Structure formats: C-alpha cells, structure tokens
Image: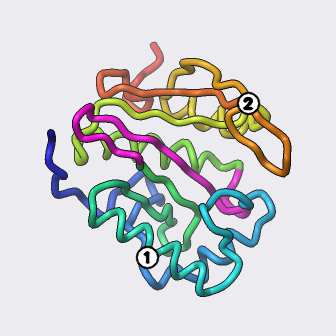
Amino acid sequence: MRETPTVREHVEASRGLWLRRWSAEDVHAVLTAFADPLMRGQATEPVTSVEAAVRWVAGQNQRWCAGSAFAFAVVDGQDTVLGNVAVGAIDRRHGTGWVSYWITRAARGDGVASRACRSLARWAFDDAGLFRLELGHRVNNPASCGVARAAGFAVEGLQRQKLEYDGVRFDVEIHARLATDADPDRITNV
C-alpha cells in the first residue's frame, strides 16, 4: 500500500490560471457558484446557505488532510474563484483516482476547465503518485466531454442509466488517463 505523499497545495495551471487548496475565505465564492441552476446536484448536500458552503469547504479540507481526496480552487491571477478540480476516491493500492470538475458561469467557455484538468492530472501523477485517473459525464453534457478529451482523457465506455436526476436516468460516458499517456500540453503538431 502506497503512503499519502506530501503534495503541493498551489500549482500554476497555465499563464494566469492557478490551482490552490480551498480556504475558509472562499465560502462566499462557493455559495455564489452553487447558486447557478447548472450546479444543482454537484455536491452531496445542497449548498444553499453560508453554513452549507462552510461545510463544503471544510469537507474538502478534511479529505485533503486524510489523503482521500484533493480538491483545488481554480483561480485567476487576482485569486478570483473560477471553479473546482478534484481527484477523489483515491485507491493507493492501485494508484487510481476519480476526477471531477466544475466551473463558474462567468468562466465557462474559455478553456478554464480543460487547462485546470490537464494541470490536475499532471499533479496527480507527479505529486500524488497516482497512475490512473478516471472521470465520467452524462452523455447529454457535450461540454464536459470536450473538457475530458482536451485534458487527455480517452473514452473507455458507457455506463447505462447510472445517474438519476429528478426521476430521469442518464447514461454516463467513462474516460481515463494514465500516467504513461501523452501529456496534451507537451504534444506538438509537426
């Protein structure tokens, strides 16, 4: 069984984009992000109050300290929260983790999610010592599929009717990236 390594808490994702550990100062940014109707269902409990946002941030930090999940606030050069990228469900024996992400309404469509996910993957392989990262998205979410592909995650299959939202079941497409896969930031076109 691999031990939880000491990991960086602040990573430059790309010029002007950083990943950093969530802090108590982010509570209002979290509350604002979860007020977006598209964010409904993105947390285990609804984040509809300051208290719920405090619990959400505290939960991220508890899992970080336990080494079971690592969530980063995605921020710009002024430390404005643009989203979240995380690797959770970490299995140290097998060196695997599950990637998740969300981006605030104001930051969507600018490549923030894919740049943050590429950086998270490098961090997970280099700092956290993982070998395989997995993620899934509802098949009716082509934007999330685009993020996964741009971040170097290959399609591996379909999980039929895995998720249920408001009484409707959705298929989930599964993607994965290995530490040995080509890094999309280091591939050059000839």
Q: Position of residue 64 (x, y in %)?
A: 32, 63
Residue 131 to residue 99: above or below: above
User: Which picture quadrant has residue 41?
Assistant: bottom right
Residue 17 tag number: none
Residue shown at the point (45%, 41%) measured from the top left: 98
Please provide the residue range marked out in magenta: 89-108
- Front one among 70 and 185: 70
Select label 2 or label 1 by which is in front: 2
The local secondary structure at tag 1 comes to helix
Which residue is label 2 attached to? 161
Q: Position of residue 62 (x, y in %)?
A: 35, 70
- Residue 61 position by quadrant: bottom left
Q: Nearer the viewer, residue 12 or 21?
A: 21
**Badge 2: residue crowd in 10 Å (few <14, some 14–19, many ≥20):** few
In the rendered image, the quadrant that contains the N terminus is: top left
Which scheme is used to colour this image of the protein?
rainbow
Residue at the disc numbered 1: 58
Reply above or below: 121 against 18.
above
Q: Earlier in the sequence, mark 2 or mark 1?
A: 1
* Quadrant, the C terminus: top left
* Element assignment for label 2: strand
Please name the amino acid that badge 2 sits on. Answer: Gln
The residue under the point 47% across, 68% down is 77
In front: 174, or 154? 174
Q: What residue do we see at 23% from left, 47% from top?
A: 127
Query: How far is the residue under mark 2 from the one under mark 1?
Result: 32 Å
Q: Magenta segment: does it hold 91?
A: yes
Residue 182 horizontal side relative to residue 74, left or right:
left
Q: Is residue 101 magenta?
A: yes
Q: In the picture shown, does residue 17 fall above or below 33?
A: above
Q: Residues within 10 Å of mark 1 (few under 14, many from 20)?
A: some
